[in-house]
Amino acid sequence: LEVFVGKYIPLALKSNMIEINKIIQKQSPTLEELVLCMDCVRENGDVAFIKLDGERECDHYTVLISFPQNKRRELIRSDGGDLKKALLEVLRKYVLHVKDM
């Protein structure tokens, strides 16, 4: 969307980012849609990770995205008790990250 106007980015990356942006702007995206967004992250060459931690007392979910092609970039991470909220937080930060590349 307008996030990527005036920037040169490869067509596949642009298509994936438009799809992610479209889904995270929905009023209530489904868990399936958010997982599909994480697959778009993978297609972009980045690492998408969802961890369910049974040993923790709270914040059982960890969602993160790392950037193996650019090791100087900090990973994006969210820990929480609600998987959808954690996915949304990480994906919103990811869109901003790609915009700032």
Image: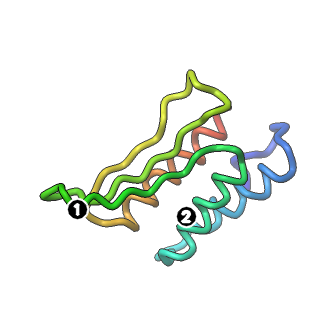
Residue located 52% across and 54% down the image: 91
What is the number of the mark on residue 24?
A: 2
Residue located 63% across and 59% down the image: 21
Q: Earlier in the sequence, mark 1 or mark 2?
A: 2
The residue lying furthest to the top in this view is: 72
The residue lying furthest to the front in this view is: 55
Is 77 on the left or on the right of 82, as rendered? right
Q: How many marks?
A: 2
- Residue 34, compared with residue 60, is above or below; it is below
Is 65 on the left or on the right of 59, as rendered? right
The CA span between labels 1 and 2 is 27 Å
Element on which disc 2 rests? helix
**Quarter of the figure with the N terminus:** bottom right
- The location of residue 43, given as percent across then percent down, is 72, 54
What is the number of the mark on residue 99?
A: none
Disc 2 packing (10 Å; few <14; some 14–19; many ≥20): many
Element on which disc 1 rests? loop
- The location of residue 66, given as percent across then percent down, is 54, 39
Residue 83, image quadrant: bottom left
**Quarter of the figure with the C terminus:** top right
Colour pattern of the rendering: rainbow
Is 50 on the left or on the right of 10, as rendered? left
Of the residues shown, which amino acid type is indicated by label 1? Gly
- Residue 59, compared with residue 44, is above or below; it is below
- The location of residue 10, given as percent across then percent down, is 85, 44
Q: Which residue in the structure is indicated by mark 1? A: 54
Residue 26, image quadrant: bottom right
- The location of residue 74, given as percent across then percent down, is 49, 29
Residue located 63% across and 44% down the image: 46
Disc 1 packing (10 Å; few <14; some 14–19; many ≥20): few
